[in-house]
Structures are given as C-alpha cells and as structure tokens.
Amino acid sequence: MFGGTGDLSMRKLIPALYHSDRDGRLAPDTRIIAMSRGGLTDADFRGKVDAEVRGQVPADDPDGWQRFLGRLHHVSVDVGGQNRSGWSALSRLLAGYEQRDRVFYLASPPATFGPFCREVHRAGLVTPRSRVVLEKPLGHDLASAQRINDEVGEIFDERQIFRIDHYLGKETVQNLLVLRFANAFLEPIWNSLWIDHVQITAAETVGTPGRRGYYDQAGALRDMVQNHLLQLLTLTAMEPPARNDREAIRDEKVKVLQALRPITGGEVERFTVRGQYTGAGDMPGYLDEPASTPPTEASRRVETFAAIRAEIKNWRWAGVPFYLRTGKRMPYRRSEIVVQFKDVPHSIFPGGSPNRLVLRLQPEEGIELHIMAKEPGAGEVTLKPVPLSLSFGKTFTTRVPEAYERLLTDVLAGNPTLFMRRDEVEAAWRWIDPILEAWKADPVLPEPYPAGTTGPAGAHELLGRSGRAWHEEEL
Ligand code: BG6
C-alpha cells in the first residue's frame, strides 16, 4: 500500500483487511506492506495501527488481532527521489514470492500513479500476477486522466488495473443490479413510460476540516459527482447485460455515460448549481475550517455542494431527468437513489400521490417502495402512501461488509467487475469537463448555504421549475 500510513489506509483499508483476515479470506502467509516516506520500522507501524485502528474493530478477537499485526510491514520509499534503498528493501521482502498474487494499492494523489508504476517496474517487482489499484480521483480532468491511464498502461495491462470507486462496493449498489435483473416486475416499468424522474443524492454532515489542500483543487464535482454519483446513475440506467460478467456489465455502463447529453456553454447555468457552506451555529464555514494554510482565491471559488439535471439520450430514458446532488455539511448523512414514478393515468380517488422507489445506501442500507393504500375506516376513502420496506440489517443477520472489504476481496480474486474500466472513467470526465470549464470561467462565486441546511436555493429551483422537489423524507 503506497500511502499506507495515510488517512484512507488507517480508516478504511487496514480495517477492511483485518475483517478479511478474520473471515479467513487472506491466504496464510499474506503480508501487508505499507510504503510511505515516514521512516517507520515494522514495529513502529504495527504500534501505529494498534493505536489507531484497534478501536474500530471488534474487541472479541485478541489472538486474531495479534496475528493480523504480525502480517504488517513498513518500507520507506521516496517516489521520484534519488534514494533507492526503499526499493531494495521492498525487493528483499518480496523475493521468493514471485508466484504469489501481488497487489500494489496506490492510496496516494493521482500525480504519483505514473511515477510509482515506473519505479516499481524499474525495481523489477511487476510480475504477471501483479495488480495495481488506483484510488480516485483519477486525474482532475479528461486530459490528465488520459495521461495517467497512458502512464500506468505502459507498465500494467488493462486487466491488471483496478480503478476503485468505493461506492461500487456498497451492498445496496450491488443489490440494485439484483433488484433490477433478478425480479420480473420492475424491468417492464423501468423506462420513460412509467418513470417521471430519478434523484441521486449523496449528502454528508461532515465538513472538510484539515482537507482544504485537497478539496480546494477538487470540489464536489470532482470529489463525488465524476465518480460516485455517475456510477450510481449508470447502474440505475443501464440496459440489462446479457451475462453477469465483468465486461458485459461494464460495456452497458459505459454506454450510459456516452449517452449523457453534454451540458455546455450557457446551459451550464440552467442545469447545474454549485454552493459553498457558510458558518452557522457552532459549525464553521468552508473558509473557516481548520487548515494548515489560509484560504485562497481557489478556496473562495470551490464548490462544497453541486446539483445537476442530467439527461440520457436513448429510447429508455428520453425525457426523464436524472437529478444529481451532493454536499458537505448538510443536515443529514444520506446516500440514496429515488425513482419517482408517474401518476396513475386516471385517478378515481382524491389525494393520491405517485409511487416512489427509494434505494438507500446509507446510513442504513435498504430498499423502500412507497405505494398507495386506503387508510382504515368507514366513510370516504382516504389514501395514504405506505412503504413496503426491506432493511438489510433486519432481514439478513450476517454482517454487511464495508465497501472496501468487498472490493479488496475482488482485487485479490482478480475480479474487476466492480472497478472502473479506462473508457468508463474517460467517458465520465468527457461529460464533466465542460461543466468544470464553465464554472471556472464564471466570475460569480458558488451560492452560499448555511452549514446544516439542504444546500443553496438554486438547488431547489432546479427541480421547482418543473414542479418537482427533492426527496427529504426519513426512511
Ligand atoms: C470520498 C470523498 O470518495 O467519499 C469524500 O473523497 C467523501 O469527500 C466520501 O466524504 C464519502 O464516502 P461515504 O462512503 O462515507 O459515503
């Protein structure tokens, strides 16, 4: 793991690997080698993991935890530096293991992906059974993504490259495919004849404390929309693949991205909204979040909230808007896909409302179908929307694995279905680029919204213009 002592590694990767180990999914002599500039010994690194990660995993397995700590190593490498001793140390650790699966996980900024791959190749460590995992964001626009893909592609074959988007590892996301393609009743109505619109929301209560360096450059569009939200859109909108196989599914997803109607020039103002949170109560505004450097012009211009009205130009979805929104410091943490059906063609009861299917990814994973029912009682028929609901937590007693756990298992098994193919990532950037450019050229700053609210007024107008509203209901 390059960047192996960083935040992602400590919060997500190491706990996921521990759970895999506990469930018996790591081969007996699997080793986990963190690479960083940190100058740590194995013992230092084990101590760090013990101190920082132990609290995140169940305390009922002290022996398993000790065994797991024993798998950990640390090597200091300086990618791009003159000192090659780290690479020699890594070579010594890996000598004799050439026939084993070898995964290089790059939990580091995208600019390091190309240089890392070149250096690991130069050190002679890339074997036919090696894989490389690239964390998002892959580049900051189409051109940089292509450059990175070219650089990594010089060393690794496409089948060895795993571009991770952890949303694809979430249980509900995989269930979306099962719901759509393993049940007969949905597919006939999954189109513009029956569906009015779709809303995809990823709302977070957290702000960006300590992340300004990254976030000023990324913003919500690059951080969440280009990857997580567009992935949810493709899975919702894709055609049924002929087989449950890695390429068949990814082929269908890429077709959705290619069918997205470009939003360019003057349309950007009409179909997109960007916002930045301001201080409210005891919550600081974006510009006042703790950071190692003072805010700059880039900080003032960066969006912490984005909403977009997307359209997919094909037979199935003509005329059905897909509304995407994501924001930091919203009043709730919630990721969901809401499929809003059309109203009945002819209503004989007063007070009905159209059906709605909600696929909730978090905080609690579940699926809910809102149908109309009669409220019990004599006299006038009164309608009430009631949910048919499936809570994964209540229905299945097995532990729901974290997204990273599932995805790391797939990398080890060499299964790339839930990873993004090169053409997918580039198609996503192709659609995002004109929006980024228009926002960059716009002298107007992002619309302010107070921390703890549902985003700027413009986001509500985006739907309000066509008589629609964001789904805000708790499940
Ligand atoms: C990451 C983003 O990819 O996803 C973060 O960089 C964001 O800004 C996170 O907070 C959200 O992930 P999750 O699984 O908590 O929804």
Image (spheres, rainbow, N blue to C red):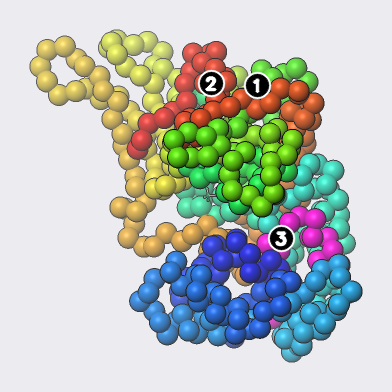
In 3D space, how far apart are the residues under numbered discs 2 and 1 (Cα atoms)?
Answer: 14 Å
Determine the residue positioned at 59% across, 48% down: 290
Q: Would residue 102 be counted in the magenta stretch?
A: yes
Residue 457, disc = 2
Which residue is more in the foreground, 223 or 102?
A: 223
Tag 3: amino acid = Ser
> Residue 111: where, in percent of width, then height?
80, 55
State which quadrant residue 372 falls in.
Answer: top left
* Left/right of residue 225 with respect to residue 382 in the rendered view: right
Task: Point out the frontmost of discs 3 and 1.
Answer: 3
> Residue 198: where, in percent of width, then height?
52, 29
Tag 2: amino acid = Ala
Determine the residue positioned at 38% across, 25% down: 355
Q: Secondary structure at mark 3?
A: loop
Q: Which residue is mark 1?
A: 271
Q: CB of mark 2 within 8 Å of CB of mark 1?
A: no
- Return the disc, 3 or 1, that comes first in the chain's sequence: 3
Magenta part of the chain: 98-116
Tag 1: amino acid = Phe
Which residue is more in the foreground, 381 or 38?
A: 38
Q: CB of mark 2 within 8 Å of CB of mark 3?
A: no
- Return the disc, 2 or 1, that comes first in the chain's sequence: 1
Does any portion of residue 98 appear in the rendered image? no
Which image quadrant: the N terminus?
bottom right
Is residue 228 depicted above or below 151 in this figure?
Answer: above
Residue 108, disc = 3
In 3D space, how far apart are the residues under numbered discs 2 and 3 (Cα atoms)?
Answer: 36 Å
Determine the residue positioned at 53% across, 39% down: 284
Determine the residue positioned at 58% across, 44% down: 289
State which quadrant residue 216 falls in.
Answer: top right
